[in-house]
Amino acid sequence: MKKTAVITGASGGIGKAICYALARDGYNIILHYNKNKAEAEKTALQLKNTYGTEVFILGEDLSADEGGRLLGEKIKSVTNGVDVLVNNAGLSLVGVFQCLDSESVRRLLNVNLANAMSLTAELLPLMINKKSGSIINISSVWGVVGGSCEVHYSASKAGLIGFTRALAKEAGASGIRVNCIAPGFIETAMNARFDEEAVRGVVEETPLCRTGSPEDVAELVSFLAGEKSGFITGQTIGIDGGLGI
């Protein structure tokens, strides 16, 4: 029987690449999206045609206070077993700390941290019942070192790291591994807003002297989801070209 992987924020960028990597690895996919249903449906069709993967497409706004719980209920309505959960959905918020409006901050914290925790709480019992599972949280290099003018974003991603470490200790006895990935500057739509000069500045600070690709992150997710990483838990692994060292 095929295993099932849940990927949030999966309609584009890193999330889409993760879907392809896990479908290639033999998982059925539960693909979450917020607004871009057309892209989610396109991705689902491609996965089915390429890998014969069963794909469920579920929409939910994770910036809403109850988004994680509601998405969890939808997932449980289409499957009674989850083997891998990738909390990938994320928002970015750039600006001077004290000048950002409270509603934007609330939405960011919901997507990046609160609803990742809420969704995990909904799905964790399914993993406990199977005595196995892999939870992978997508943080950021800025969650490790902090980013100027991205204070709320950095704090939310640092929260994911603390969540990862604590839950790994709690869930390990049930055979469940919890790990975190901290990407550096990845070529995604979220980062497309930065102009050429800003990107060049980041590249100059990156020891490997380049940006990363969504596929770079997806391959690390593939490793952490599989049996080859069976003795790894509670870790935050940077995939940032050395930016965070």
Image (tube, rainbow, N blue to C red):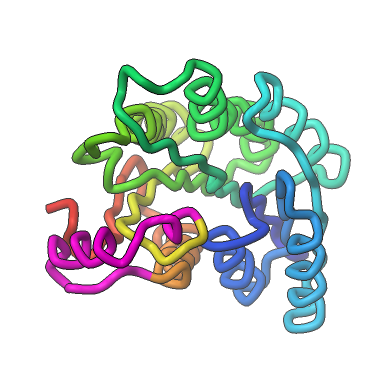
Does the magenta-highlighted stretch encompass residue 215?
no
Q: Is residue 156 above or below residue 8?
A: above
The percent position of residue 194, horizontal first and vertical second, equals 37, 57
Q: Is 13 in front, or is 53?
A: 13
Point 75% across, 35% down: residue: 71
The residue most toward the bottom is 50
Q: In which quadrant is the N terminus drawn? A: bottom right
The percent position of residue 221, horizontal first and vertical second, equals 47, 61
Relative to 61, is 77 on the left or the right? right
- The answer to whether residue 107 is seen in the rendering is yes
The percent position of residue 28, horizontal first and vertical second, equals 74, 63
Point 70% across, 60% down: residue: 3
Name which quarter of the figure residue 193 lies in: bottom left
Relative to 65, is 208 on the left or the right? left
Q: Is 213 in front, or is 162?
A: 213
Point 70% across, 56% down: residue: 4
Does the magenta-highlighted stretch encompass residue 200?
yes
The percent position of residue 226, horizontal first and vertical second, equals 50, 63
Where does the magenta region start and end? 190-212
Q: Is residue 153 above or below residue 229?
A: above
Q: Is residue 73 above or below residue 34?
A: above
Point 73% across, 69% down: residue: 43
Q: Is residue 234 above or below residue 56?
A: above
Relative to 160, is 144 on the left or the right? left
Q: What is the count of numbered marks?
A: 0
Name which quarter of the figure residue 186 lies in: bottom left
The residue most toward the right is 77
Relative to 9, is 168 on the left or the right? left
- The answer to whether residue 227 is seen in the rendering is no
